[in-house]
Amino acid sequence: MSVAVVTGSAGLIGSEAVRHFAGLGLDVVGIDNDMRREFFGAEASTAWNVVRLTSELGNSYSHHSVDIRNRDELAKIFAKYGKDVAVVIHTAAQPSHDWAVRDPYTDFDINAGGTLNVLQNVREHCIEAPVIHCSTNKVYGDRPNSLPLTEQETRWEIDPAHPYANGIAEDMPIDACLHSVFGASKVAADVMVQEYGRYFGMKTACFRGGTLTGPAHSGTELHGYLSYLMRCNMERRTYKIFGYKGKMVRDSIHSHDVLTAFEAFFRAPRSAAVYNLGGGRFANSSHMEAFALAEKISGVEMQTEYVETNRVGDHIWWIGSNAAFEADYPEWKQVYDVPAIMQEIYEANVDRWQP
């Protein structure tokens, strides 16, 4: 028996990881206690996804409503499956800048402490299993805002002569910048994943994601940019724009493209790998450009409210480079651009998201 352990298994990337690795023939063990509901309220609950996974996958999926901060319960799961564990996909996290400020202890305990708990259990029970960690581009803090950016009609854009013109690389420093409390806890987790790779010779990868999205995303105002934007449009809600004239740029990567990258690493793992993973130049948009796309897809005008103050540590422009990952895994290719992502979000939720 080969087992894939997925933390945060009811979330966007977690649930897609469950399906993907079950499709490869692995038995999947999911760990998720629906903390997203506690973070963001009932509309962000992922309980519906647990029901769907259980009904779709049957005996190939086993769900555990366990908090990754609970060392004893987590250890029981890893001890049960032991060396049958073939891969660990760690997606569980507290994902919001704003929420982290309200409760820094919980944010750090989940993001940093929870990651340490997962790593130590892999070390003790299944040390050969690759660990795929969902990190974030927020480990770079607000340093991207120091890049030479110019304001255009619908977006901010980087000087085309800059070395990062095709996307920010992993050599961007993370020191001496503002991270937000959330960013700091994710830095701690990211560095610990690298350390277990180097110090203990484990096979680990930090995937520093941009905007990870897809139709299974339970988008909410504090987290889930494209999903929440499309939901606001479809339900005739007002979308709040926080600063930078709505011209801030995000690259966006579909969960399908994320999971094919994870599979590539699973099949040929390395130790202490670090990769930016996002839409890159292939899939990116400003908020204003995404508003226009949403209106085109649904035929409904966006309702927006502009808030002059930007969120602390928010990026004005983020387009990451996938070049390092593509160099190590040249067969991996992106499939979804932003229009395709938003169209699929619309089609998947047109019966659920009503005015």
Image (cartoon, rainbow, N blue to C red):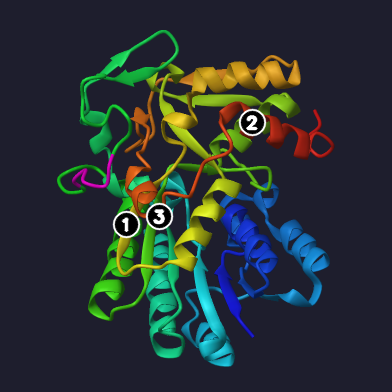
Q: In the rendered structure, find residue 340 and report the number of the disc placed on it.
A: 2
- Name which residue lies at 58% across and 39% down: 335
Q: Residues within 10 Å of mark 1 (few under 14, many from 20)?
A: many
* Residue toward you, 21 or 211: 21
Q: Residue furthest top?
A: 153
Query: Measured from the top left, where is residue 50 in percent x and y?
Result: 73, 64
Q: Is residue 313 visible?
A: yes
- According to the picture, the residue beneath numbered tag 3 turns out to be 207
Q: Quadrant of the C terminus?
A: top right
Residue 263 lies, with reference to residue 315, above or below; the image says below
Q: Amino acid at mark 1?
A: Val
* Residue toward you, 251 or 310: 251
Q: Which residues are magenta?
A: 169-173
Residue 285 lies, with reference to residue 101, above or below; the image says above
Q: Is residue 223 visible?
A: no
- According to the picture, the residue beneath numbered tag 1 turns out to be 274
